[in-house]
Amino acid sequence: MTRLIRFIRDTRGAAAAEMALMVPLLLTLMFAGFEAGHYFYTEQQVIKAVREGSRYAGRLGFDAFPCGGAADATAVAQIQQVTRTGTVTGTNPRVRGMALSDITVTHRCDANFENDGIFKGTTGGAPIVLVEAEAGYNSLFEALGVIDSSAIVQASSEAVVNGI
């Protein structure tokens, strides 16, 4: 009986037992934080890409995006390339796995600005370009089989063509 009482009162190894119980939870929280940070970083890269693509489109001439007509194919290809790589002649994508086919460029015209400012004399008003992109999310821990990276990150941005 005295052995049992001594065993119950013995606190040696209590810290090790508590640590053994907490390590899995702490590791899970740590790796979840890494994964969330990487997801938000990827999302920010896609957002930055479409913003730069739409800004580039806004600096193109009015003839690249005629109101009532089709957009110039060369201009669309350049916008896609700028969105994907950051430059017209770039080769490395900003987001791993992003292809030119993942980027769409469309335009519309706002007739409310037909006779105002730089749009005076243009037919149909102000051309507005919409750049949309999507990229598959590449998980940090996909190789471990823990996470299925079927998530897609999407972003879009619009810019008025200034005809500069």
Image (tube, rainbow, N blue to C red):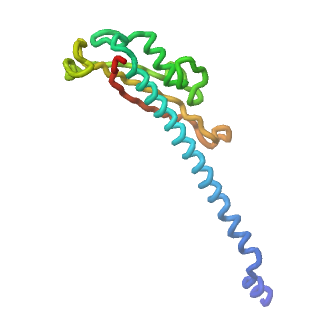
Q: Which one is nearer the viewer's eye here, 2 or 11?
A: 11
The location of residue 161, given as percent across then percent down, is 34, 20
151 to the left or right of 147: left
Placement of 105 over or under 14, stated as above or below: above
Residue 54 found in image quarter:
top left
148 to the left or right of 55: right
Q: Which one is nearer the viewer's eye here, 151 or 119?
A: 119
- State how many labels appear: 0
Identified at 62% across, 54% down, the residue is 30
Please identify the quadrant where the N terminus is shown.
Answer: bottom right
The location of residue 67, given as percent across then percent down, is 28, 13
Placement of 134 over or under 12, stated as above or below: above
The location of residue 82, given as percent across then percent down, is 50, 22
Placement of 120 over or under 37, stated as above or below: above
139 to the left or right of 63: right
Identified at 45% across, 25% down, the residue is 53
Please identify the quadrant where the C terminus is shown.
Answer: top left
Identified at 43% across, 30% down, the residue is 51
Single out the residue that lies furthest toward the right: 3
The location of residue 11, given as percent across then percent down, is 73, 80
Residue 22 found in image quarter:
bottom right
122 to the left or right of 51: left
Single out the residue that lies furthest toward the bottom: 2
